[in-house]
Image (cartoon, helix red, strand yellow):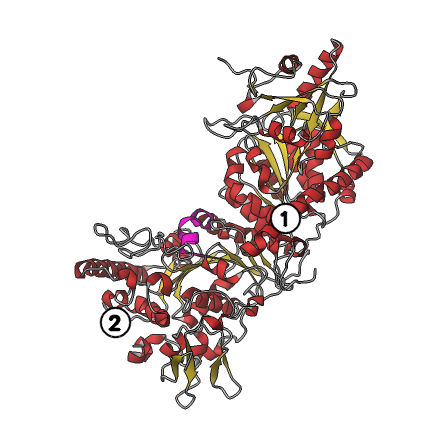
Amino acid sequence: MNTAMQNPKSIESFELYAPKLATKEEFFVGGHRACQGCGEALAIRLMCKALGKDTVITNATGCMEVISSVYPTTAWNLPWIHVAFPNSASVGSGVEAGLTALRRKGKIADRRIKSVAIGGDGGTMDIGFQALSGAMERGHDMLYVCFDNEAYMNTGIQRSSGTPFLAATTTAPAGKVVPGNQVWKKNLPEIMVAHNVPYVATACQSYPIDFMNKVKKARQVKGPSYIHCFVTCPTGWRSPSETCIKLGRLALETGIFPLYEVEDGKYRMTVEVPEKRRPVQEYLKGQGRFRHLTPDQIQVIQERVDIEWDMLMIKVQNSKSRAELRAKRAK
Amino acid sequence: MGKRVGMEVAIASAEAAALCKFDVASVYPITPQSHVAEHLSDIVADGRVDASFITVESEHSALSSAMGASATGARVVTATSSQGLLFMSEVMPITSAMRLPIVMIIANRAVSGPINIWNDHSDIMPMRDTGWISFFADNGQEVVDMVIQAFKVGEDRRVMLPVNVNMDGFQLTHVVEPIIMPDQEEVDKFLPPYEPFATLHPDKVVSMGTLGMPEFFTEAQKSKNVALVNSKKVILEVWKEWEKQFGRKYEPIQSYRTEDAEIALLTMGSMGETAEIAIDELRKQGVKVGLLKIKLWRPFPFDELKKAVKGIKVLAVTDRACSFGGPGGPVFSEIRSALYDVPKRPKIVNFIIGLGGRDVPMEGFMEMVQKAAKGKLSEPYEFYGVRG
Amino acid sequence: MTEKKGPETWQEINPGCMVFRKGSAADYHTGSWRAKRPLWENEKCIKCGVCYIYCPEGCITEQKDGYFDANMDYCKGCGICAHECWPGAIKMVNEED
C-alpha cells in the first residue's frame, strides 16, 4: 500500500499541489530506454527541470548515458557530453573552465551557464572518485550530482562502494557462507563536506520538490556543489516497478537515507522524518536483494542505522556555519 | 622574421602555445614534461595569455578536462609524458573519435618498469592507433614550429582531430637551443581564431559522445579513419604555407644526403641530428649513405616513404621502443609493411636503440651502417649496444 | 550539416557521432514495452499533479481541463502513477483488455 496514504503528511512538507508549480518544460524526454519505473531517469528529469536551459550536462558512462544517447538520437534537450566512465567530474570541470575563459574573453555571450556533471554510484564513488575529489577541491563553479542506486546496474548489478551492508549483488551474492555485501555503504556526502564544498545535500527521487529546490540552490552557488541523490532501481533491487517512490520514502522514514543539506559547514534536515522512525525491516522487506536476511542480520542493520542517525543528529544540532564562526570571532 | 633566442626547449614549447593564445591549459606535471607545465602556468599567472589553467589531479583528468574545455569551443593545450600518457590512454581514442582538436606536447620518456625517467619512444608507440595526428620533432626549432602548426592542422574544418607533438625528454626538453621565436603578429597571420564545428552551448544544443550500436560503430570508425588519412593533405598544405611565411621547410619524411645513397638510416626524433653527423663522417670515407627522418608518424606517409627509399639497397630502421615478442620495433614493422608491395624495395634491418636514456653517439650510428651494409643482421632485430 | 535521421553509410555519420536533433529519442516509442496501462478516473482526480511529477518518462501531462493523461507512445506501464495517486484515481489495467 502507498505509504503516503497512511500518512499523507509524510509525503513531503510541501503543499499538496506543489507538483503543478514545477516547470512543464521537459529537458529529458520520453523515448529514453530506461527500465520501467527507473528512479534514476525520474531524478534526471526532475534535475533538468530545476536546472533550466542554461546548463551543460556532462554524463559519466552508465545507465543514464546508455539509455539516453543511442546514436543517432538523444533524449537530451540540454547540451550534453559523455566521454568515459571515470571522468565525468574532470570533463565537467573542463567544460566550466572553457565556458569561463570564453565568456571572459568575449568569445561567447556574457551569461552564466552552469556546468553540471553527473554519474552513478560506481562512476562517482568508485572509479570516478579521484576525478570528483580533484574537481571539487579545485573550486570549479560546477555542480556534481551522484545518482546512487547502490550497485553497478548498467553492467548487471555488481557491487559498488554504494552497495548497502548485506545486500545481494552479482559480485557480492547471498551465498551459503557469505550473505551478500560485507561492508557498510561509503558515506560520500560526508567526504564531500570534508572537501569544504560550500553546498552539499542528499536527495531522493521520492521527494521531488526537495530535490529540485536543492538543485536550484546548488546552481546558485558560485563554486563547487555536490548532491547525492538516492534513486531506486527496480531491476537491481528486485522490487516491483510501481514501488519506486515508496522505497525512497521508506528509506527516509526508516532513517536509512536521511535528507539533509550542509551549507557552509552547517547541517540541516530538509524533510521531516517521523519522530518514531519506521523499523528498517519495512524498507528491506520489499526488495529481493535483502530477501535472504535473517532477523539477527536485520537487527545489526537496525543498530547501525540508529547509530548513524544519532551521529547525524549531533551534527545537525551542533554544527555551525563558517560564517557564524567568523561572526563570533569578530565579536 | 622572429627573433633568435637561446631557450630551453620545454619552455619554448610552452611559449609556442602562448603564441597560439590558447584559452585553456589542462596539465598534470611529470618528468621530463614538468617545465612545460610550469611554464604554461607562469604564462597564465602573469596574464601573458588570457586563459584558464586547470591544475588537474592526474593525467586522466588532464585530457578529460581538456576535452570538456575543447567541447565548449576553447583552444586547448595539454602536455604529458610516459606513464602520464599511458594513464591518458583511455581518453586518447575518445578525443579523436569526438573530433576535438586538442594539442598535446609530449616529452617522450621510457615506460616503466623498471621505472626510468629518461628518453625513448615507448610511451607514444602504444598510442599509435588512437587516431591522433602525430608529429616528431628533431630539435627545439621544430618543436616550436610544430606546436603552432598543430593548432592550424587540428582545427581545420577538414580535419578536426587532436595532434600530438613529440619531443625527446631531456635530450630536447632540458636543452637550451638557439630558436627563432616567431613574432605574435606572424603567428596571428598564420593561425586564424578557432572556429569550432559544434560547441556545448544552450543556444545550439548538441549531444556529444553518444552510444554507437553495432549498426553504426563500423561506419563511425571508418569515418574517423578517413578523417585521419585525409588530414595529410591539410598537413602538407599547412607546411607549405609555413615554409612560405617562415622559410622553414617541413616534410613527412626528410631525406638527408640520400641522392645516390645505397644504404640509409631511418630515425625519428632528436637522434636524427646525431645520425646526420655520422652520415657526414661516413660520406667523407666514401660510403654512399644517407638518412631518412620521419616527422609525420600519423597519418603514416606511405607515398613519401616509397619515394624516399628509391635506389636504396639497405634501409636500417632504428626504433626507440620494443614490441615485445613481436617482429621488431614498431617503426620497423610499419616500414616493412609499407614497403612490402614495392617491387624494388630495399632490404630492411632493425636496430632497437637508445632505450631509457641510453646514449647513442655518432660512432654508434656509423657502426650500425657498417653492420647493416650486409643487408642482414645475425638476429631478426638487434638491441644495439646491449651488454652480454 | 544537415541532420540525418538514420545514417546508412560512413559518409553520413556526423563527425564525432554528434547528435544535433535535441530530444530526438522521442522517435523511439517505448510504449510497446508496456504490459499494463494506466487509466484515469477523473471523478476521483483532485488535479494535484503527483502522477505528472513522478513519471520517469515525463509522458504524463496536464490536459486543458486540468486533468492528467499519459502519452501511450512512451508510457512503459511502470505503475508509479497509479501507486502514488492519493485519491486512487488511476488504475493499471492489462494492455490487452
> Of C35 and B129, which appears nearest the observer?
C35
The location of residue B193, given as percent across then percent down, is: 73, 49
Magenta: main secondary structure: helix
The residue shown at (73%, 25%) is: B344
Q: Which mark is residue A275?
A: 2
Q: Indicate left or right for A227 with A82 as reference.
A: left
Q: Indicate left or right for C68 with B236 as reference.
A: left
For mark 2, name the chain: A
Task: Identify which amino acid the numbered label 1 is placed on.
Answer: Lys
Is disc 2 placed on a helix, strand or loop?
loop
Q: Which mark is residue B222?
A: 1
Both on one chain, marks 1 and 2?
Answer: no
Rendered view: A193 above or below A28? above
The location of residue A93, given as percent across then percent down, is: 53, 52
Local crowd size for mark 1, using a 10 Å CA cut-off: few (<14), some (14–19), many (≥20): some
The location of residue A328, given as percent across then percent down, is: 38, 58
Q: Where, quadrant-wise, is the C terminus of chain A in this rendering?
A: bottom left
